[in-house]
Amino acid sequence: MSNNIHEEEVLGKAYDARLIKRLLPYARRHLGLVTGGAACMLVAGGVALVLPLIIREIINGPFTSLSLKGSDEAALEALGWLALGYFVLVVVQFVAQFGNGYWFQALGARAVFDLRKDVYTRIQHQPLKFFDRNPVGRLVTRVTSDVEAVGEVFASGLVQLVGDLLIVLGALAMMFFISPGLTSIVLGAMVAVGVISWVFKGRARNAFRDMRLKLASVNSFLNETIQGWRVTRIFSTEKRQARRFDERSSDYREATYRTVFNFAMFFPAVEIATTLALAALVWYGSRQILAHELDFGSFFAFFSYTQ
């Protein structure tokens, strides 16, 4: 079994790109869901880029005029129209986010259904020696939890990643238009978070793979011992089987601890980097406002883009 596990780890490292290509046909089967979800995602992202600009106009326009003049009919009318436009865009964003989440979750569910059916059919047509090399528990894990993990690629993975990348690029363009100096601070923070994520990716990937293999080992042992329970009772090997099960469960627990530790390190590290970046933004932005190089509305809009 150790040789099989080793081969599985090597394949997981070498063929990620090929595996993604093999998953694409499952998305093509439901092209309507992909198109609808992507369209809603782009609409929601576009609205998210426009909303801070409306806030900037409200602060620099009606709010400033009302604070200086006290009562201004034109400013009140402009404030009403801007508030109405903001409300309409929020409603549009809500509908788009609902459509995005619903269609991509439906895509994930249908892709999981198709993939699980194909995997089950493939297992049925394997030769007998295949089942000698692969315990039943491992195969059960492949058809259940592993297929569910693949479904997450469709529900909130690859397509969402592309959409988020486009939104980030759009936000960076808007931030650079508002203040190149503040944007340089954001880019520095993004580089730091990228380095942290790159380090975490390797550690988390190995930990998840190890946890999956340990879970498959537990499932395999359970399947074998339950099916052979009569033999266990006849030869009175319950205690030995219990010790073997404890060993496998302990290995799975330790693998889970390593995964939890990686996440416990990752999120605080990202939080520290983002907090330092926000502090630098407040310091530099305040200096620009005091020097009349940046108005408060633009600074508020810039800060909104960083969220």
Image (cartoon, rainbow, N blue to C red):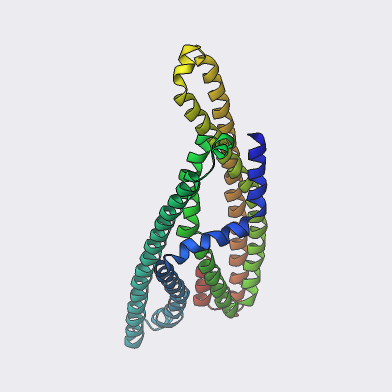
Q: In this orientation, does residue 261 appear? A: no
Residue 89: % across, % down: 37, 75
- The residue at 40%/55% (across/down) is 109
Residue 27: % across, % down: 47, 63
- The residue at 63%/52% (across/down) is 201
Q: Is residue 113 left or right of residue 210?
A: left
Of all residues shown, which one is farthest toward the bottom? 74
> Foreground: 277 or 48?
48
- The residue at 56%/28% (across/down) is 248
**Up-down relation of residue 13 to residue 80 (above or below):** above
**Up-down relation of residue 126 to residue 63 (above or below):** above
> Foreground: 77 or 275?
275
Residue 64: % across, % down: 43, 80
Total tally of numbered discs in the picture = 0
Q: In this orientation, does residue 297 appear? A: yes
Q: Is residue 29 left or right of residue 253?
A: left
**Up-down relation of residue 153 to residue 48 (above or below):** above
Instruction: State which quadrant residue 216 falls in.
Output: top right
- Say which quadrant the N terminus sits in: top right
**Up-down relation of residue 52 to residue 3 (above or below):** below
> Foreground: 109 or 180?
109
> Foreground: 261 or 8?
8
Residue 63: % across, % down: 41, 78
